[in-house]
Amino acid sequence: MSKTRGKAIECKAAVCWEPRQPLSIETVKVEPPRGGEVRVRIAFTGICHSDAHILNGCIEAKLPVILGHEASGVVESVGEGVTNFEEGDHVITMFLPECNQCRCCTSGKTGTCEVFMDKNYANGLLMDGTSRFSIRGETVYHFFDTSTFSQYTVLPAISLVKVNPVAPLEKICLLSCGIPTGYGTAVNTAPVKQGSVCAVWGLGCIGLAAVMGCKAAGAARVIGIDINADKFELSKKFGVTESLNPLDYDIPINEVLKEKTNGGLDFAFECVGTTKTMEQAFMSLHKGWGKLLVVGLAPDGDTIKVPPFELLYGKTITGALYGDHRRAKQVPELVNKYMRGEILIDEFITHTMPLDRINEAFDLQRDGKSYGKIYSRFPRDPAVKGHFYKLQRLYTKARKHKYREYKQSLLKQIETLHEENPKQYWQLIDELQGKEKDDKSALVAPFDWLNHFKNLTEPKDEFKERLQFLEEKLNILEKRKCFNELDSRISETEISTALSSLKINKAAG
Ligand SMILES: NC(=O)c1ccc[n+]([C@@H]2O[C@H](COP(=O)([O-])OP(=O)(O)OC[C@H]3O[C@@H](n4cnc5c(N)ncnc54)[C@H](O)[C@@H]3O)[C@@H](O)[C@H]2O)c1
Ligand SMILES: [Zn+2]
Ligand SMILES: [Zn+2]
């Protein structure tokens, strides 16, 4: 049983005190879960434009609030009456709950849930009308019942999905919103048919995932539309066959599209969130059957205008939340699809950064520097993290200089850790899997560690599966030639001094 069960936890969170101001990293108190709730240690969170809508002041929220809705984590404890989750389960958070009892959930016709439609999310409170967060006694509010920009959060059990524990948490956090939203709108809601002509407005994470869905469904053409031309080159790997920048034309984009597609689109996906692009997309549809899928979130109170006669021609407008996915059933399937290489996730990640740099992540999104997703890593325990990086840095340096004895000594320490403190050992492995992609030193170390791990005896199958996954990942990285150029300026004395100061903190586990 976790040591924190039933007690309040103090941890770090990024708090929004007012719109258009940077988030502030604060120590927050997180109460234990009440009936029907679960407390989760967040491992990784993505940032989504829906969080940015609150930050920009386009959508109102009760303040101060902890934003974030796209995350993976591990169950810390469960509240009364929760039977489908237990401590240690790997989970991803769902902004769209699934109660499995309402008319929508039981209809088999939609992925929407009446709990979501009926609940007043603007009040920032959980189902029982209270909050689990506070700072120095002041209430801090929830966002979409998820609030993932915190090391610990409390959510209703119906807002969580349990997933394969072997799946890497730093990747599957993106199955919590962006990827399934775009992908599902194409494959579930539309659904796109073989040979269709599609266009996607907005090549952010949602739009790129919609492109991936169109491609998976067999679309003949997928036209990517964005006002930021930097997005075009990268969008090709998701399935964009041609791209269009509306700013390059003096005539409305719908006229350009009608000409290019011999009468209009079969399916148009609006993944920006403005009424203007929704109207443009509608006007680009083929008469008789064209369908507009609204995915973007427009500001509160906005309405779209379309000529009603166009509807008489047989065009339709619809939309979906979370790509109409049935959460408990389809999300674990998506995780397995990723593990089998059938859907992309890694390619959506442009940056990873620790929680305390979350404002930079929003700047990157706003400036269009991230074509896909940015997420924040949540160090579990600063002691473990610090130790890990030290070990890793030293090992990399030792490797470069072929200092066999240093290397042996480091490996010995890892081995000791494995034997004496398996829990801390696994924390290191998790950290290892979550390291930044472009940090070459982080990529080198695991490669040799891997060979070492193979010689360790480990009875659990889980270990083997994790190892296999890590190995596949490293093979890909090796192919991409990430293992070159290491820092060679480090001196021998520096290594030995650092080494002697390096002691595994056995108490930290
Ligand atoms: N339906 C759902 O369940 C759901 C879930 C999550 C997010 N969303 C919404 O989806 C939208 C997209 O989210 P994201 O995270 O991908 O955002 P993002 O900011 O990463 O991407 C938006 C893209 O749209 C482009 N763009 C802006 N104005 C444009 C215009 N006039 N024409 C063409 N392109 C334009 C931007 O350059 C950018 O590439 C947001 O409105 C978000 O709130 C909906
Ligand atoms: Zn989102
Ligand atoms: Zn429901």
Image (cartoon, helix red, strand yellow):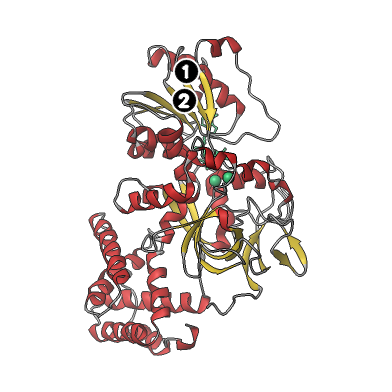
Which mark, residue 168? Answer: none
**Residue 34: where, in percent of width, then height?**
66, 65
Which residue corresponds to mark 1?
285
**Dots 1 and 2: beta carbons under 8 Å?**
yes
**Residue 37: where, in percent of width, then height?**
61, 61
In-image side of 407 versus 123 (left or right): left
In-image side of 404 versus 421 (left or right): left
Please give the name of the residue rendered at 37% of the width and 32% of the height, measured from the top-left corner: 214
Please give the name of the residue rendered at 34% of the width and 49% of the height, measured from the top-left corner: 337
In-image side of 131 versus 383 (left or right): right
In-image side of 364 versus 275 (left or right): left
**Residue 9: where, in percent of width, then height?**
63, 73
Indicate the quadrant where residue 212 lies.
top left
Front residue of 378/184: it is: 184
Numbered-mark total: 2
Please give the name of the residue rendered at 51% of the width and 10% of the height, measured from the top-left corner: 313
* Res 282 visible: yes
Amino acid type of disc 2? Answer: Ala
SS type, badge 2: strand
Which residue corresponds to mark 2?
268
Front residue of 386/124: it is: 124
137 in relation to 405, above or below: above
Crowding at dot 1, Cα within 10 Å, few <14 / some 14-19 / many 20+, comes out as many
